[in-house]
């Protein structure tokens, strides 16, 4: 679980970071990763570069950009109302503005650990529910910038001279469309994909078994209207068959 702390008060961010790490040490099944920012601008810059968080601690009264403005921008860039923003401030006169940011909690400075425990505990519980239902994102770097795509939208990936092309599902047309390309290798990409659904079926192809409707000896047949075939390499045939039927068995319960 990824947590951001954004406050221009360095001593306070240090204090809050120690609190979060202490709570993380007490959690058995959840690992907490903490990132600290001392301005709303720095926080939003990372969000624009593809960074994501499950919980954000945010001061309201920061220099240059206040926490409410940063919260609105965060919602706009991330396009997600699921992330809990825990506002911590010495003033409690921002209630109407906080409601407009959406999905927030408020803790007043100076805070008691008991009240912070309540806000943090509820935020963690909500974040866990979101993580369990949210589609996994594949983050990659193009020659211009960082980008991402939900893995459940990727049909297959194809490598050509260390350039990986992403082909994604178009639900309105029930077709497969070229989505984007970036520099990488098949082994590196495969390590970042959900292992239960993505399979390397040939030297240059990774396929999402979600979109495979049948298997031939030498190819997977996809579920688009054109029945696109993805080649299965000779050395991958036995594993390809096992992966296909194993995946179907799990989905059919």
Image (cartoon, rainbow, N blue to C red):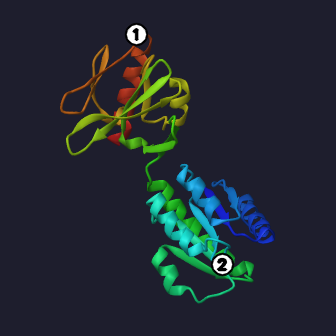
The tag earlier along the polypeptide, 1 or 2, is 2
Q: Nearer the viewer, residue 87 or 47?
A: 47
Q: Which residue bears the numbered disc 1?
A: 234
Say which quarter of the image contains residue 247: top left
Q: Where the C terminus falls, by quadrant?
A: top left
Tell me if 201 is positioned left or right of 143 in this view.
left
Please tell me which residue lies in front, 172 or 182. 182
Pinpoint residue 194: horizontal percent, then vertical percent.
48, 38
**Image x and y of residue 239, in percent:** 43, 20
**Where residue 48 appears, x then y in whole percent?**
53, 53
Question: Height in image: 111 above or below 141?
Answer: below
Disc 1 residue crowd, few under 14, some 14–19, many 20+, Cα 10 Å = few
Q: Secondary structure at mark 1?
A: helix
Residue that extends furthest to the front in the rendered view of this protein: 64
Query: Mark 2 — residue?
Result: 61
Among the 4 quarters of the image, the one containing residue 25: bottom right
Q: In the current view of this chain or complex, which residue is farthest to the bottom?
A: 93
Task: Determine crowd level at label 2: few under 14, some 14-19, many 20+ residues with C-alpha closer than 10 A.
Answer: some
In this view, 122 is above or below 34: below
Q: Residue at x 36, y 32 (%)?
A: 209
Q: How far, Cα to Cα, is label 1 from label 2?
A: 62 Å
On screen, residue 13 versus residue 52, left or right, reads: right
Is 149 in front, or is 82?
149
Q: Secondary structure at mark 2?
A: loop
The quarter of the displayed image where residue 198 is located: top left
Residue in the picture at 55% in, 66% down: 125
């Amino acid at each position: 679980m990824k947590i951001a702390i954004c406050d221009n008060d360095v001593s306070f961010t240090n204090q809050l970071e120690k609190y979060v790490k202490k709570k993380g040490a007490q959690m058995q099944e959840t690992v907490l990763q903490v990132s600290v920012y001392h301005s709303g601008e720095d926080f939003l810059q990372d969000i624009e570069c593809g960074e994501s968080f499950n919980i954000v601690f945010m001061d309201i009264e920061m220099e240059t950009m206040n926490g409410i403005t940063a919260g609105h921008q965060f919602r706009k860039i991330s396009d997600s109302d699921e992330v809990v923003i825990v506002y911590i401030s010495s003033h409690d006169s921002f209630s109407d503005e906080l409601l407009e940011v959406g999905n927030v909690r408020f803790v007043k400075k100076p805070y008691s650990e008991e009240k912070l425990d309540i806000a943090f505990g509820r935020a963690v519980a909500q974040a866990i529910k979101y993580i369990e239902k949210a589609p996994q994102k594949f983050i990659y770097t193009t020659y211009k910038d960082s980008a991402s795509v939900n893995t459940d939208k990727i049909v297959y990936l194809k490598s050509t001279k260390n350039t990986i092309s992403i082909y994604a599902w178009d639900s309105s047309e029930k077709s497969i469309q070229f989505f984007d390309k970036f520099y990488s290798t098949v082994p590196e990409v495969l390590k970042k994909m959900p292992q239960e659904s993505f399979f390397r079926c040939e030297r240059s192809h990774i396929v999402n078994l979600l979109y495979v409707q049948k298997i031939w000896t030498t190819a997977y047949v996809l579920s688009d209207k054109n029945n696109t075939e993805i080649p299965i390499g000779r050395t991958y045939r036995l594993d390809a068959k096992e992966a296909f039927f194993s995946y179907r068995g799990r989905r059919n319960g």
